């Protein structure tokens, strides 16, 4: 698994290990659990990726990426290096090692402004940011590796992922939790009416497990709750879950933000995936964790390995 030390990755490692799989992580960062088998290094580096696949693996979960939309706008080259060159390196190593399946963390930000009532896998790829463009490029490479080399690649187009263990994130749910614990004012980018779909990390993990094991699957798969909320509604939900008086202010809208993200996950439903978490219940669980958290440890990572802008960005 690439990116196994990150927010989604740590939950994916735990789920696969519990299910009895032999897991090896490749990540720039160490994994908090010393029992996890990890090759620490950069996925752009051939020796690192080859070492990660040494011994043979049936499947790869590819999560490692530069995930910040805003940083991709500031420094597109860095984002391209990991998200495109790094993905190419992972695909090449998978091909050489005879890996049968790869499940990739893509995003609905590959599609750009909505042209239909809901985003499906058929939406045209018109990314609005370098981040979205690198994910679209990765999907294109995967299409070719599926067709020519038989590495069955599924691109899970995730919406905004939230859940336990997101203390290092800078996306909306983490920013709201942090504001409550630190007693700071939460800044809403723009008018707060922009809608986003929120999917729980546990549901995302289940989707990756399905993509690895269901041999009928390949290509893009929209993974979201299927219910979108405005930023103002998210603020209300978090106020309700926490019982906190959270003060908010409005700042300028962020560049590259998708005006709306409403997704139709019918293809994933037909494949047998259903989200188990509604936002109200999911966010209550996240608050339970943050309620007692050491807030000093709740600061985003230095350099902010982040997804988002508003409601977090165009993820
Ligand atoms: N969290 C979301 O809302 C969301 C939404 C859509 C898509 N995604 C995608 O899901 C994946 C995981 O997201 P996350 O929220 O867990 O992010 P994260 O930043 O918490 O984790 C990413 C991990 O990748 C590692 N990494 C980054 N560059 C690397 C490199 N060059 N070589 C090796 N490791 C590297 C990081 O150290 C980190 O541990 C990413 O590909 C992201 O683009 C996330």
Image: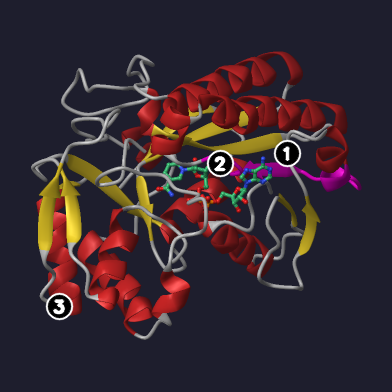
Q: Residue at x 30, y 45 (%)?
A: 312
Q: Position of residue 199 (x, y in %)?
A: 34, 52
> Which secondary structure, mark 2?
helix
> Which secondary structure, mark 1?
loop
Q: Is residue 157 above or below residue 167?
A: above
**Does the image show residue 277?**
no
In the picture of the structure, the residue carrying the numbered disc 2 is 211
| Label 3 C-beta lies within 8 Å of the nearest ligand 1 atom | no
Q: Position of residue 263 (x, y in %)?
A: 26, 35
Foreground: disc 1 or disc 2: 1
Nearer to me, 80 or 116: 80
Q: Residue at x 34, y 71 (%)?
A: 286
| Label 1 C-beta lies within 8 Å of the nearest ligand 1 atom | yes
Q: Residue furthest bottom?
A: 292
Foreground: disc 2 or disc 3: 3
Q: Quadrant of residue 32?
A: bottom right
User: Residue 244: which disc?
Assistant: 3
Asked whether disc 2 touches disc 3, contact meaning CB atoms under 8 Å apart, the reply is: no
Q: Is residue 177 above or below residue 229?
A: below
- Per the model, the C-alpha gap separating discs 2 and 3 is 39 Å
The region drawn magenta spans 51-66
Sequence order check, earlier mark of 1 and 2: 1
- Per the model, the C-alpha gap separating discs 1 and 3 is 42 Å
- Per the model, the C-alpha gap separating discs 1 and 2 is 21 Å
**Does the image show residue 279?**
yes
In the picture of the structure, the residue carrying the numbered disc 1 is 43
Q: Is residue 138 magenta?
A: no
Q: Position of residue 315 (x, y in %)?
A: 36, 38
């Amino acid at each position: 698994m690439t990116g196994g030390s990150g927010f989604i990755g740590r939950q994916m490692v735990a789920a696969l290990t519990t299910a009895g799989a032999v897991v090896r992580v490749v990540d720039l960062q160490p994994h908090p659990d010393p029992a996890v088998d990890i090759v620490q290094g950069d996925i752009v580096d051939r020796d690192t990726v080859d070492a990660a696949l040494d011994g043979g693996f049936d499947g790869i979960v590819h999560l490692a990426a530069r995930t910040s939309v805003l940083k991709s706008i500031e420094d597109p080259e860095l984002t391209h290096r990991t998200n495109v060159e790094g993905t190419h390196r992972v695909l090449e190593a998978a091909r050489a090692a005879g890996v049968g399946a790869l499940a990739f963390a893509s995003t609905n930000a590959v599609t750009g402004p909505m042209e239909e009532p809901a985003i499906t896998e058929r939406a045209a790829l018109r990314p609005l940011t370098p981040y979205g463009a690198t994910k679209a490029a990765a999907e294109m490479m995967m299409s070719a590796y599926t067709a020519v080399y038989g590495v069955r690649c599924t691109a899970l187009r995730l919406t905004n992922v939230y859940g336990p263990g997101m203390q290092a994130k800078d996306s909306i749910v983490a920013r709201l939790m942090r504001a409550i614990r630190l007693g700071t004012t939460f800044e809403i980018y723009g008018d707060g009416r922009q809608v986003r779909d929120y999917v729980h990390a546990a549901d995302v993990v289940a989707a990756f497990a399905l993509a690895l094991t269901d041999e009928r699957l390949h290509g893009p798969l929209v993974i979201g709750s299927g219910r979108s909320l405005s930023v103002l509604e998210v603020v209300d939900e978090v106020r309700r879950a926490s019982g906190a008086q959270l003060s908010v202010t409005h700042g300028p809208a962020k560049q590259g933000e998708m005006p709306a993200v409403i997704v139709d996950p019918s293809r994933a439903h037909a494949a047998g995936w259903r989200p188990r978490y509604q936002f109200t219940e999911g966010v209550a669980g996240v608050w339970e964790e943050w309620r007692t958290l050491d807030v000093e440890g709740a600061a985003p990572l230095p350099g902010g390995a982040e997804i988002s802008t508003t409601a977090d960005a165009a993820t």
